[in-house]
Image (cartoon, rainbow, N blue to C red):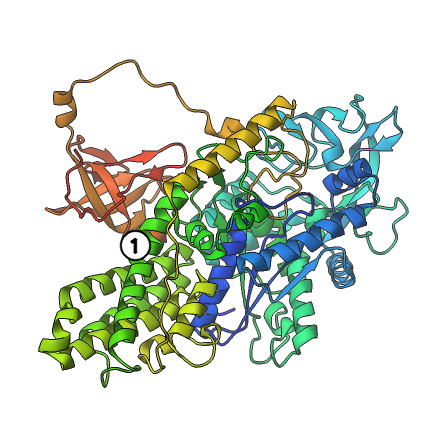
Amino acid sequence: MSHDDFPTDDPAVVTCGLPYANGDLHIGHLRTYVGGDVYRRALERLGQETAFVSGSDMHGTPVAVNAEQEGVSPERFALDWHERYAATFPKFNVEFDNYGHTHDETNTELTQQLVRDLDEAGHLYEKEIMVAYDPVDDQFLPDRYVEGTCPYCGAHARGDECDEGCQRHLEPGEIENPESTITGNPAEYRERTHKFFEVSEFSEYLSGFLDRLEGTSNARNQPREWIEQGLQDWCITRDMDWGIDLPGENPQDLVLYVWVDAPIEYISSTKQYTDRVGADEFDWEAAWKEGASEEQPEGGEIVHVIGRDIIQHHTIFWPAMLEATDHTEPRAVMASGFVTLGGKGFSTSRDRAVWADEYLDEGFHPDPLRYYLATNGGFQQDVDFSWEKFRDRVNTELVGTVGNFLYRSLLFAHRNYDDAPIADGTSDEVEEAIEEAIEAFEAAVNDYSVRAVGDAVTDLARYGNEYIQRSEPWKLVDDDPEEAAQVIHDCVAIAKAIAVLFEPIAPEKAERLWDQLGEDGSVHEVTVEAAREGPAGDLAEPTELFEQIEDERVEALNEKLEARVAEAEDGGESDDADGGDESESGDADESDDDTTDDMTDIEPLSDDRIGFEDFQELDIRIGRIEEAEGIEGADDLLKLRVDLGAETRTIVAGLKQLHDVDDLPGTKVVVLANMEKAELFGVESNGMVLAAGEEADLLTTYGDAGPGTKVK
């Protein structure tokens, strides 16, 4: 691992958190998989050697419980879901180089070997612990087979996590007032011998690891609190039948905890990719093993793309395991926010969801959804999906900006010229604009911002619309045909650059554009250098890439969703364990219940009114963040330099834990400009940035209002 800017000489592995093989996928789950696919494609456009891998998480108690309810084996139950996931991802142009699962032979062997390595290195030990036991049903109760009270905050909790309260990971025996989820019987605690991994011995290493870690800021900041509170050793075994057996002497027939074998699937899936294509194509050992290759002695560039609910596993447990066994530590962790639906949480049992297959069955193309999920806010921010918002983004940005430029430019070129290149070369002005787009694209990759990857394209298309409108080639064709040819050549050059840079976001549409441009080969095989080369192909007659979504269509989709939810509620459904994923991130999470509406409780509107004159006294302006940096000694505060048109001000805002600091520059915000000045941690704040909710969803503009524009 180099920590140099991409592309590097080291092989990169991009992974997505494993979907739990326990229920249907909806568009909330797709966010991390689309994000991971966008990021690996962007790396490849830079020329980075990359493997993109994941797999289905087959083990854990929810699979065992639901399989028993359906009268099938856990293996058959999980394999059925695994096969559905493997078929669904390509439909959204999420194309893994390898998609395995945690129960296959490769992962079983690698997991048991890594556990043996931990043991031989002296990092495992046995300990007598108290485990919940159902005396009536005569069985031990691992993880999700037991519920009770969190010992830390007093909230209702499940066996291994305080999911309704403080979100802490709970070890076996910690939960108070335990009850069996199978029978409802009160449980008691009995002594059992289990294996523990001494995570606490890695505190110093993990602190340094977090200092080196790249990716989103939430992946670095959250784990620091756990280290400061003192790390507890980790119980890595469970009393159940379904899972990977603990290697070696195992008199109690224990299996490994699901979070031991789940991340090892990243390595296993990469190995399976190498086994299929050969080490000359991609060497899994050079990527994952320190010292395995003379060319890459410190291993490759490992990038994990996950939901934020599993940060702890990927930044504490997993890197400690890798360090203890001489594997490559992750270079970056990109942790996404959640996805809500129309301001409310997804609920699988109430059927309040837009299912992955449903989206496609409605006739929508996958690429507009990829664009929406990738570019609607920073990666670590929560994203709200509604059919209205989806329509607006598609119609305004994909149809109105990108599609409009491409169609009008290529149609004019096709009708007025036989082929391309139309002029001898691209003008200096347009070359500069394309170069700026490429630089923005490269910066986005190195900033781990999938949104900025998309923004580089829409900004270039916006420039293209302005350029063709300003140049008016339709007037030049007769008066100055040479200049007209130059303008159209420039526009086709911009279109080619868009095809290359838009491939990560909209791969299928980019390939179609590439064909319309008459370029050789596939856009999936070229690098950003192709965007600099200018057009060379024979233009085909263009067709519009994106379709307008009509208001009537949105109304029909909303009516269908509302009817479905009403039917589920009339049927007496409740948010019980039905195979949903509470995180909505689709990652390796043992969640077996839904996201509830509690996360979006809305305060009642105030009855206190103000007059119009009072409102006019508020000087609310559009600003653009130019710089963002942390304030020493303040965990939550950032010092922002905000351009307000007439001047640039320093404003202190509590955004540090909720936004990727590196993503903030360039963001438009709404500012209360006549807020009284205040000094916070030695920094004078001259204004207030407005945001919504506990997650500080920054207020911004729908259109192109510039810095200093007054909000009326």
Viewed as shown, does residue 102 lie left or right of 345? right
- Give coordinates of residue 326: x percent, y percent: 65, 65
| Figure check: 386 above or below 489 | above
Residue located at (60% from left, 48% from top): 587
- Identify the secondary structure beneath mark 1: helix
Q: In terms of depth relative to the viewer, which is nearer, 263 or 199?
A: 263
**Which residue lies under the disc numbered 1?**
400
Residue lying at the far bottom of the rendered structure: 424
Q: Tell me which amino acid carries mark 1.
A: Gly
Q: Examine the rendering and report whether any part of residue 5 can be seen.
A: no
Viewed as shown, does residue 205 lie left or right of 404? right
Q: In terms of depth relative to the viewer, which is nearer, 453 or 491?
A: 491
Residue lying at the far top of the rendered structure: 607
- Give coordinates of residue 172: x percent, y percent: 73, 36
- Give coordinates of residue 585: x percent, y percent: 55, 45
Residue located at (55% from left, 47% from top): 311
